[in-house]
Image (cartoon, grey):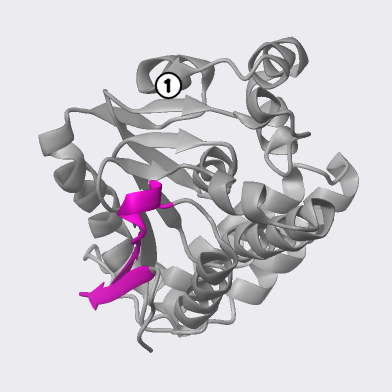
Amino acid sequence: MNYETLQITIDDRVASITLNRPERLNSFDMKLGHELYDALQSVAQNNEIRAVVLRGTGKGFCGGGDVKEMHAAKDKPRFLRDLTRAIHRCVIEIRTMEKPVIAAVNGAAFGAGLSLALACDMIVAVKDAKMSTAFIGIGLAPGCGTQFVTKLIGYQRACEYILTSKTFTAEDGYRLGMINKVVDAESLDAAVEEIVSAFRSLPPIAVGKAKLLINKGLDNDMISHLELESKTAAWSAGTEDFNEGVTAFVEKRKPVFKGK
């Protein structure tokens, strides 16, 4: 499918989705919200894809919601309700798809753009990237991201960064536990490739179920989560990949996983 606000490419079992509104710092309008959700659904349902990379064109990753559109909206509450719902669908799709999603943050990530990055399973960011929850700075209650930030960095620090819209660097984000790796701009693609290359050979079903368990574990109590782990492990033991994995272990060779 051809999109107006993003580009999607698939190469060697890795899908790259690139937000493409550089004149607006790749900010969310309704069109981008709908198209990104469609693209995410498409890659989630493609069993050939082992990993997904989310990028931005131009100088930034994503500037959040399109403030000019917010200003122009006649019914601002209705517009923000619709826009946040469109963004939330994308966030939910990222977190619930059983594939690893890596954010390649090439520059600014503000507001919903930061939330979009934090929804991803891993984040690689360039040193010059600037980030902020941003909402308070325009007089808006946060439309997304408060739960992600609070769970990642704790209550007091979350208040510091959310309530004041404090801008921070990629290095700050790394120290706070938000970002996996910080690199020079010219090393971003190589750093992302290093991550996704591992997923090309890892068992995709097991990886997907592990992601599911990590997310469920954020809210489950210990006893119910242990039971879910037991059931999920037992289910995965019925896959061809598990048979290949244990056979390769016994035969002292590298396994070849097929996602079956």
Where on the picture, by quarter, is residue 249?
bottom left
Residue 195 located within the stretch drawn in magenta: no
Is residue 66 visible from the viewing direction of this image?
A: no
The residue tagged 1 is 174
Viewed as shown, does residue 118 lie left or right of 3?
Answer: right
Taking 44 as reference, is 260 above or below it?
below
Please name whichever residue, 47 or 104, is drawn nearer the observer in this view of the structure. Answer: 104
Residue 149: percent from left, percent from top: 66, 30
Q: Residue at x 28, y 49 (%)?
A: 195
Where on the picture, by quarter, is residue 181?
top left
Where on the picture, by quarter, is residue 170?
top left
Residue farthest bottom in this picture: 1
Viewed as shown, does residue 199 lie left or right of 33?
Answer: left
Please name whichever residue, 16 or 251, is drawn nearer the observer in this view of the structure. Answer: 16
Residue farthest left in this picture: 186
Residue 62: percent from left, percent from top: 44, 46
Is residue 69 visible from the viewing direction of this image?
A: yes
Please name whichever residue, 128 or 221, is drawn nearer the observer in this view of the structure. Answer: 128
Q: Residue at x 40, y 32 (%)?
A: 180
Part of the protein shown in magenta: 6-26
